[in-house]
Amino acid sequence: MAVSKARLRLVSSNPPGGAAAADSGRLLVEDLYRIHRGALCNYVARMLPGGPQEVDVILQETYVRLLRLDDLQQLRDNPRAYIFTVATNLVRDSLRRHMRRRGDFHERFEEGEHESREPSPQGRAEWQQSLQQLKLALLQLKPLTRKVFLLSRFEEMTYPEVAAALSISTRSVERHMSTALKHLQKELNDIL
């Protein structure tokens, strides 16, 4: 992975200890950073899901943090371990921010929104049982009353159309429908 080598310099006010101490500390950080930059770049790139730009951001922030150190003793004692620890912590912070952002886009799973349109086995069995009760109740009706009901409700014919089809008056159709509906309501009361 090719990562640009930006030259970074700290621009700050005079730190405690004078300009000479600051310059020697800055030079130490720059030298150590230059020595370990290649390995650090590869290390960070393996841990981050993003591209080279994300690696550059971590490397730059690592460099800035090293330059801000007040006490360089830990950096002098074990420079590679210290630099890699700073970079690892920055990568972890970056990954946490990334996961938090992903969590913001997460949609909750609501059972009601994803229900199957297919009836459950229990629902299917209940439906079959209800149909069977309807059939039995219809068979208990007189043939003409049953025929009027079926033409009106299942063939979706109007009362005048039913009257014309059966050669009876519209008033007779109304009486037969009233009889059928009262009977069905009484017989199917437990499922209605």
Image (cartoon, grey):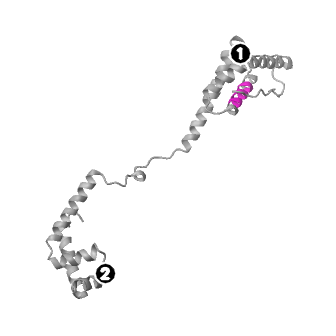
- Tell me if residue 157 comes above or below residue 187 in the rendering: below
Q: Residue at label 2?
A: 158
Where the C terminus falls, by quadrant?
Answer: bottom left
- Answer few, some or many: residues within 10 Å of disc 1's Cα (few below 14, many 20 plus, some between 14 and 19): some
In terms of sequence position, does the residue under pointer 2 or pointer 1 come before the other? 1
Residue at image coords 62%, 29% = 48
Pick the front one: 59 or 175: 175
Q: Amino acid at mark 2?
A: Thr
Q: Is 7 situated above or below 180? A: above
Report the amino acid beneath label 1: Leu
Q: Secondary structure at mark 2?
A: loop
Q: Which residue is mark 1?
A: 75
Q: How many marks?
A: 2
What residue is drawn where x is 26% and y is 52%?
122
Q: Nearer the viewer, residue 99 or 150?
A: 150
Which mark's residue is nearer the viewer, 2 or 1?
Answer: 2
Magenta segment, which residues?
55-64
Q: In the shown orientation, is residue 180 left or right of residue 23?
A: left
Seen in the image, is 144 located left or right of residue 153?
left
**Magenta stretch encompasses residue 47:** no
Residue at (23% x, 87% y) in the render: 171
Q: Does the stretch in magenta take in 63?
A: yes
Q: From the image, give the main secondary structure of the stretch colored magenta.
A: helix
Between residues 113 and 119, which one lies in front from this camera angle?
119
Q: Residue at x 30, y 52 (%)?
A: 120
Crowd rating for badge 2 (residues with CA inside 10 Å; few <14, some 14–19, many 20+) = some
Q: Secondary structure at mark 1?
A: helix
Q: Say which quarter of the image contains residue 6.
A: top right
146 is higher (above) or lower (below) than 93: below
Q: Which mark is residue 26?
A: none
